[in-house]
Structures are given as structure tokens and as C-alpha cells.
Image: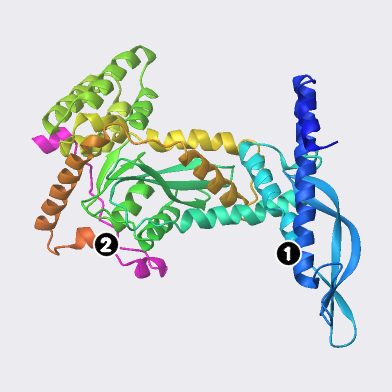
Amino acid sequence: MDQFSELRRLGQLDSSEAGRTFREFLRASVRQSLIGVMAEEVCELCGPKHRPVADAETYRAGSAKGVVLCEGRREEIIRPRVRRKRSDDQSEEVRLATYAAATEPGQVEEMLIRALIAGASGREMKSVHPDAPKTSRSSVSRLWAREGAKLVEQLRTRDIGSADWLALMLDGIRLSKDQLAVVALGISADGRKHILDFELGSSENFEVCRDLVSRLVSRGFTGRHGLLAVLDGSDALKQAVLAFFPGAVVQRCLVHKERNIRGRLSRRHWGELARLFKRLREVEGEAAGREAYGDIERFLTDKNAAALKSLREAGDDLIALHRLNAPSTLHVSLLSTNLIENSFRNTRRKLRRVTRFRAETDQASRWLAAALLEAEKGFRRVIGYKDLPRLAEALASHGADCEASCRCPGKHREGPSPAASLSGASPPLRAAPSAPATPRQASA
């Protein structure tokens, strides 16, 4: 039956039967094409069959059963064989380039990797793709170990030195009881978000945070206009950022602080607390920010001493963006760590099938890199990105003020050299004040 009569048959079948027949027709066409291409390669090596090249080093050696890959499935064919004469009067098999290309498992491996990242179990690949090769549990595990390491390398070798960075967010995500990852997310001057890097550790301690920021600096990360660091309140994160970027403006996450204070208050006060924090997120400018902060402070004064202490512990860091007089359109994106928390939410969906992360291997790094890169594909520009030039001007002005008041001009911009950071010596830390000054005290 020729191809035209085969295609005419499709109109006489129901949709499912027509689809199956059409796919069989395509696979048969692919097999015939492969056989034709291999026959042409044999002719180039050995000459025409009816007129072989005299004294040729290669000669035809019959045929044999073979298997090629088509759309991730095994397809049996009859492949031609060619042998080459050697100087010791022996011969050896010549592997046809066309046959090698037809058996190359790249498409199958890509299909398996996509399935793993999407959440399929490696144990079930054999039943999901019964006609595909290398779908056993051990084969899939070896494939993921190799390809997952490439994803980690891809994430950590991307160029981050040429971008104009304005903001840096650092936060930790718990992978298991004994493993935590600190992840860095950067916001460039055009409003785009990028996953920069991550570092694994047992907790969100200073050594882990320092190693992460150190690697970012060695890769060229810098704030040309200045840097806004949005953190969740971790002292280790703040110390690591200020160790390499002493002039950075640190903004505490208002969502974390509100949640922390709410946990100390009676439930009947939650509504008023939410209203006051909402006002703090909406007002623009330093004066309005201090006023909104003062309202929260006065509200907590006669409610709960622990809640008031928690508020004052953050101090000016709660209104750092207000003190820059940045447009309020940026508050949605930069007054909290929600941007990186949202990527963590998508990351957890990818990691939920992993029940145990082995600390003695790079398993956690592979899975985390894959999940973060997948989450990054859905990133959009931050809300209010058109007002980022005004933030850049405010950060530059803040950096100029810092340098003017510093005895060593330029120190706030340069920071320690990457080589010194990676040598193992701890960079000098800024001396912590004896008691954090509240906005109310600062204004007085």
C-alpha cells in the first residue's frame, strides 16, 4: 500500500484509530528515510554496490538487526554493515555516523529530565515510557546525577557582573531537618528578578551567609548606584551583607515583623495592628514613614511589652525605604521578602517528591538548582519598575552621604576584594551598636 492510499484510509477511521494509523505511518516513513540515508553513507565509503571501488579499505559486510530512536521510542530496523581492513590483515567494524546519530539518546534523556523536574518519580519512568531505553531506576538516577550537576553549574556560571543591580534579597529555605539553603535573589535596574545563587548549610548562620555573598562578589555582583538589601531580620544575613557592602541600605521585611508582633498580641488587637502596618506600607517619604511607625509604637505601648520590644528591635530598618524617599509604588515589592518567598513556594512544589536529601552527596544542590531555575521562568518585572530610576538616585545619594561622613572615602563602595573573601579569612564586620535607635529617637 503506497503512502497516498494510506493517507486516504485516515478519512475512513474514527479519530483515535486515525491518530494511531497516522503515527505508524510517520514512524515507517522515518525508518525508510534512515535506511536510505545509511545506504548513501555506505555508498560514500564503499562505492556503488554494482561497481565497488577497487582496493578500497572499506567494504560491505552484509546487514544486521538494529534499533534506532524515534520520538523517544525504540524502532527496529535492518542496518547495513561496513568493515575496514587493517594493516595486520584483520578487519574492524565501521560505525556509521548516520546510525550513531539515530541511536543518540539525547531526546530520550531530555524527555526523562523534563518528567523528573515536573514531579514524576524516577521509579515509575519504566511504566510511563515503556518503549524508551534507559528508563530503569538506576539509569534514571545516573542520568539525573549527571544532568543535575550541569544545572548547578549553569546557575553558578551565569554572568551577573554586567547587570546593574539595585536590590538584593536573601532568605533561607528548609530542605530537611539537617539541611537549609540560603538563596540570593537580585533585582536589576530594569525591574527584572534573577536567582543569583544559593549556599547549603545546617542553619542560617553567618558562615553560610558569608560564603554566599562572597561568591556573589567574586562573580562580579555589585551595586553601581548603591544597594538595597531586603532581609527577614536574621542577624547573620545582615552581618554578611554589611561585611561586603558596608554602605548598603537594609530594609527589614514588614510581613515578618508584623507576624512576629502579632504572635505576642491578644487576638482582639490583630485587626488594628494589621491596619497600622498597612498604613506604614502605603505612606511615602521619611516624614510619613516615621509618623506611621510612631502610631504603631504608641499602639503597642500599653498593649504588650514584648511586642513593643520586638518593634523597637528593628528600629530604622523598618522604614529604610521610606528614609530614601522612594516612590510608594515600589513598596509592594521592596518592603517585604515576598518576591523570594513566592519563588520558594514554587520551589517546594518541585521538591515535594524528594523525601530525603543526602547531605553526603550533591543531591540537594541538584534539586534546588533545577527547582529555582524552573521558578525563575515565571518571573515578571517587579511592580513599579518604572520608578526604579528614582530609587537608584536615592541610593546613589545615600552612598555619597556615607562616603562624605566616612574617614576612608570609597570604603563603602569597594568592600573587601573577592580574593581576600575566598581565602577563608573573615571580612571585618561593622561594630554593632549597643542599642538600636528607634525612628522616634532618631527624629528627636
Q: Indicate the position of residue 371 as horizontal and vertical percent values.
A: 54, 42
Q: Is residue 146 magenta?
A: no
Question: Magenta-highlighted stretch: main secondary structure?
Answer: loop
Q: Is residue 135 left or right of residue 338?
A: right
Mark drawn on residue 122? none
Closer to the camera in the image, 91 or 270: 91
What's the magenta region? 415-444
| Secondary structure of residue under mark 1 | helix
Query: Does 52 sit above or below residue 38?
Result: below
Which color scheme did the rendering employ for the protein?
Answer: rainbow
Q: Is residue 225 left or right of residue 31?
A: left
Q: Quadrant of the N terminus?
A: top right
Q: Residues within 10 Å of mark 2 (few under 14, many from 20)?
A: some
Circle 2 is placed at which residue position?
Answer: 415
Residue 288 versus residue 62: which sits nearer the camera? 62
- Residue 431: say if magenta: yes
How far apart, in angstroms, are the residues tagged by discs 1 and 2? 55 Å
Q: Quadrant of residue 214?
A: bottom left
Check contact, mark 1 vs mark 2: CB within 8 A: no
Q: Residue furthest front?
A: 51
Work out whether residue 391 or residue 207 is closer to the camera in this orientation and state it: 391
**Residue position for label 1:** 97
Q: Residue 119: x, y in percent?
A: 64, 36
Disc nearest the viewer among 1 and 2:
1
